Amino acid sequence: MAESRKRRNKWKRLFLGLLIVNIVVFAAIIALIFWPVSGTDRPPAVEEDTQPSSEFIVRTTKNNLNELVNAYIDKLLRGTNHHYSVLLEEDVHLIGELPVFSSTVPLSVHFEPFVQKNGDVVLKQKSISIGLLQLPNQKIMEYMKKYLPMPEWVSINPKEEEIYLAVTDMEIRSNFEVSVEHIDLEANNLAFKFRIPYETLGIETRQQEVGN
């Protein structure tokens, strides 16, 4: 009898844990601010993590992502004299300013996003301008790399005229893992995958209990 009650309590805790997961995932897009971590131009593949977890696909819109991205950029640029923002339209539009001599000039760059197999994103430059100055695209991106503050997981590659977003290297306060599942800006269809380790919610699986 006691064994049966113990088994029911265990399943009850699992059910409540999964219910909490569902609530947290839908709140994550609004409540969480991505935290920068160190990264490289092209992060090497990471060994597969066998830690018990669940994955959820969260779909959002360009407007929602615009608000989140620019809130993060505002936090990043706080206390600096730099100004730029990102606008998701038919493509990814970066608008800002670059210092030239003792002044600044307006910067406008349009990118096409490409989701990578590992869940990162490459932004391929489509068009670029820096005020009325006539400079090669590669040279402008060199200025961007030198003068625009970026999170450590964002790498500007002037030679390839692209920006690499190591989304999978971002650290989220809740210890969730995030990757990009799908981006279709024209259809306003954006999807992200959240991986939530069970131990984050204090849930032990049957396999973990046996191992202990």
Image (cartoon, rainbow, N blue to C red):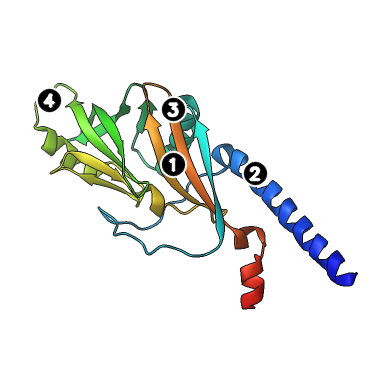
Based on the displayed image, in which of its 4 quarters is residue 211 positioned? bottom right
Give the residue type that dot 2 points to: Asn
Label 3 – label 2 distance at C-alpha: 21 Å
Amino acid marked by disc 1: Arg
Left-right relation of 12 to 95: right
Asked whether the residues under the numbered discs 4 and 2 touch, taking CB atoms below 8 Å apart as contact, a structural biologist would say: no
Crowd band around label 2 with a 10 angstrom C-alpha radius: few (<14), some (14–19), many (20+): few
105 above or below 31? above
Q: Which residue occupies 62% across, 69% down?
A: 207
Mark 1–mark 2 Cα distance, whole angstroms, equals 33 Å
Mark closest to the chain's N terminus, 3 or 1: 1
Give percent across and percent down for residue 157.
19, 45
Q: Find disc 2 in the rendering and name its residue.
A: 22
For the residues labelled 1 and 2, say whether their Cβ atoms are less than 8 Å apart.
no
Residue at the spot of label 3: 189
| Chain-order first, disc 3 or disc 2 | 2
Image-quadrant location for residue 95: top left
Q: Secondary structure at mark 3?
A: strand
Question: What residue does disc 4 label?
Answer: 133
Cβ atoms at labels 1 and 4 below 8 Å apart = no
Q: Give the quarter of the figure containing the N terminus.
A: bottom right
Residue 44 falls in image quadrant = bottom left
| Secondary element at image label 4 | loop
- Pointer 3 or 4: first along the chain: 4
Q: Earlier in the sequence, mark 1 or mark 4?
A: 1
Q: What residue does disc 1 label?
A: 78
Foreground disc of the pair 3, 4: 3
Given residues 76 and 88, the one toward you in this image is 88
Percent x, y for residue 71? 48, 36
Residue at (65% x, 58% y) in the render: 201
Q: What number is the disc on residue 132?
A: none
Alpha-carbon span between mark 3 and mark 1: 30 Å
